[in-house]
Image (tube, grey):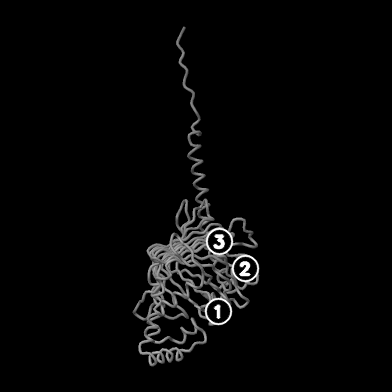
Amino acid sequence: MSDMTLAPRRRPLWRLFIMPILLLVAAAAWSAFWFFAASQVDARADAWRAQEAKSGRVYDCAKRSVAGFPFRLEVRCDGASVTLLSQTAAQAAAQAPITAQLGEILVVAQVYDPKLLIAEFTAPATISDRGQQTSMIVNWSKAHSSVVGLPAVPQRASITFDDASVNRVDGPVQAPLAGAKHVELHGRLAEGSALDRPVIETVLQIAGGSVQGLHPLLVQPFDADVRTMLSGLKDFSPKPWPERFREIQAAGGHVEIVQSRIAQGDLIAVAAGTLGLTADGRLDGELQMTVAGIEKVIPALGIEKMLDEGVPQATLDRVAPGVKTQDLNNLMGALDRAIPGLGKVIKQNANVGVSAGINALGKEAVLEGKKARTFPLRFVDGVVFLGALKVAQLPPLF
């Protein structure tokens, strides 16, 4: 019997090319999809800019480019600027635009998740009003934001700054105005909120913040954590802020300060309550405050020095309406003439009297293991009262 050798069966060669061909087709399809998506960036950006312009927020970009192939869309804007018109009641009355300019904005979106946008901002930003020279310069080491839900109704958004500073510019001279080691602002639609009656939940956190030029108390670093719930919105259509506030007031909306905490050295203050708007756009409502360490703040108010140098009428109008500067100065002089040194004693003990007055505003409490006082902070038609003491007058929001 002769041996028989069977020739191996040959497999068709075309099968070897199936996977490479499929990969080439998929790559071509993906490339076509990416370039199509990139081509839509300009159209969508222009449509968004047109909507915002109706709200008095005019965005511009000197040079725009798209990169990030194959999995991302990176939109880079060089020479970015925004001009704000009628965004506050005072600005709307004066018709004075404010323009902010910064070097670069980079917006990144994953092709497979285009509803999430992440942006980075390059410092510094310059701010000018009425088209004049720069009035403020804002700097930071790192700044970025994120938005989820676009292009439909945004579900949540956030923005953060590290090592932020704001300087006031007066010719060639820059003076510090405000700063913070870290700032975060988060906002989202509250759970269960209807789209036609949205409720916005916000969180503001400031670490190592300070404000210059307003009061010595604010120069010392402080930390803040404020959580609010805003109701009264009807939709998210573009509107100037005064119009938006007017809409909130008409709908009976309000901002509920769910929790707020400010800490500065030994001073700790917490507050909660609800604020609304009057028919003419002024804040109205009440916050219940609890403060620990308030006795250490009184000397920093400088009441003794203020009495010694003479109290400006504007200050008296704010803290003691109806009292005249001349009357107060005459009183101190009369006391010194009647009993030499009596006026000086009163001045030196003014802080003690104010401290006792504040302690009489509320009741004793304990805050984070420290002795504290609880008292109301009232807003009446834009006027801020600490008990019966008028402490500030706030401008209308529309």
* Secondary-structure class at tag 1: helix
In the rendered image, which residue does mark 1 sit on? Answer: 92
Q: Nearer the viewer, residue 316 or 163?
A: 316
Q: Nearer the viewer, residue 209 or 137?
A: 209
At label 2, which amino acid type do we have?
Answer: Gly
In the rendered image, which residue does mark 2 sit on? Answer: 253
Image disc number at residue 201: 3
Would you identify the image quadrant in which residue 340 lies? bottom left
Mark 3 and mark 2: Cα distance apart in space: 14 Å
Badge 3, how many Cα within 10 Å: few under 14, some, many 20+?
many
- Asked if one can make out residue 145 in the rendered structure from this viewpoint, the answer is yes
At label 1, which amino acid type do we have?
Answer: Ala
Residue 84 placement (x, y as % from top left): 51, 74
* Secondary-structure class at tag 2: loop
Determine contact: label 1, label 3, CB under 8 Å. no
Mark 1 and mark 3: Cα distance apart in space: 27 Å
Which residue is rendered at x = 50% and y = 48% of the image?
A: 28
* Secondary-structure class at tag 3: strand
Mark 1 and mark 2: Cα distance apart in space: 22 Å
The nearer-to-camera label among 1 and 3 is 3
